Amino acid sequence: MTQHLIHGGLPDGMTRWQFFRLIERARRQLGLSKGAIAYLKVAISNTMEEDFLAGRICSFWTSVTKIAAQAGINRRQIARIEAWLIDQGFLTKTASDHSRRGGSRKDGKIGHEFGINLAPLIARAVEIQAAARKAVFEEEEAERLRARIKKLFGDIRRHGLSEAMEAAEEILPNRRPSTIENFERLKQVAAALEAVWDDFSDEFSGGEKSHLCDISPPPNTNKENINKTCRPEKHRNTQPVRTIPAQVALLASEPLREMIELYWNTVDNRGPLSWRTIQLAAREQAIRLGIRSSTWQQQCDLLGSNRAALCLMIADRNAERTDGYQVRNPAAAFVGLARSEALKKAVVDRLIGELTQTITQSDQGSQP
């Protein structure tokens, strides 16, 4: 007998693909394998947006063989993944083990179905949102921990105490925090290295030779060093930007806007759009465009995170244009725009104004 499992719908304003991106973001926190994510992507692609409205049935009845073909995974793996998702309470099976899957729709609504029902997954939307927020936090914290571990190794090495270095290498033999993917493991390594630093701190501070304390080094009159020392630092534009996060979202390309929506759900909990959300979405889009993390961080350090995000938004949006502002390589355009902005050319504010005017004129021209 068919089980008509209805559900309470997704949170207001959330689409099925925004929901999927939350699942994808929270993969580790939810214990989902990459295969499970591939399966769920196929599952959602075989539904309709209306299926996720409150009071509807959200189900699909695609065969295991077709799911395997769409996911690029062999049939046996799909069967195992499907069974695991059902066992873990993400899905419900409404077809018997050996029956043929099927269903019908009338006026867009599912009338009956014998397949896989997504009601349990939708019911966990709030839990998945929280898991995605945790994933964002852990991702940021992991970067901070890796930087801290790297610095601790450098500090211990510079002090030249072999016992401390041996203790540090026992904790992380390859000295490479980038190889640690597990967040809990990163925390353990950082805490252990902090303990090593604390244990040997007295020996570090006591290692100075007292007879050198009163000896000042002679001034370095090398012309090259004078130039390097006296040359002013590059301008770091940290002045506030003239736009607001909501305007950035309106001007953004469709892929970037979807990324902003994702972080809006996870970071701002669908409240007022924050610059933090814009920064995280811009960084994610930068990675998608092929911009290295180190390059992105350099521009953030140089311009400030908000202006770097604006440069990314402009370059990314201009890749979609067909006029004289069109760019073929948004990654290269971002770097060039950031450099121009760093040289005090103040191009970002001008380009935002131009982009706003262009979009406004386009919207007015499309009206009847």
Image (spheres, helix red, strand yellow):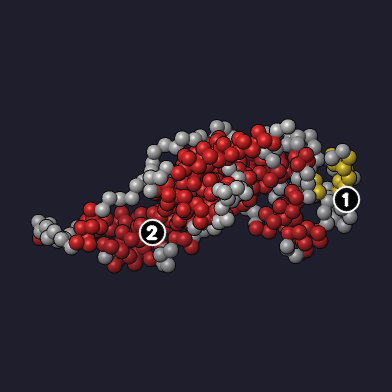
Instruction: Identify the residue shown where x is 50% and y is 52%.
Output: 334
Is residue 351 something that shows in the picture?
A: yes
Find disc 1 in the rendering and name its residue: 102
- The amino acid sitting under disc 2 is Lys
Front-lying residue, 127 or 103: 103
The picture places residue 60, in percent across and down from the top left corner, at 81, 49
Residue 229 is drawn in which quadrant? bottom left
Q: Residues within 10 Å of mark 2 (few under 14, many from 20)?
A: some
Q: Quadrant of the C terminus?
A: top right
Q: Quadrant of the N terminus?
A: top right
Find disc 2 in the rendering and name its residue: 150
Left or right: 309 as drawn, with respect to 23: left
> Does 362 sit above or below residue 207?
above
Q: Are marks 1 and 2 in contact (CB under 8 Å)?
A: no
Cα–Cα span, label 1 and label 2: 56 Å
> Does 209 sit above or below residue 94?
below
- Residue 43: mark: none
The picture places residue 235, in percent across and down from the top left corner, at 34, 47
Instruction: Identify the residue shown where x is 74% and y is 35%.
Output: 8
The picture places residue 219, in percent across and down from the top left corner, at 13, 59
The picture places residue 105, in percent across and down from the top left corner, at 87, 43
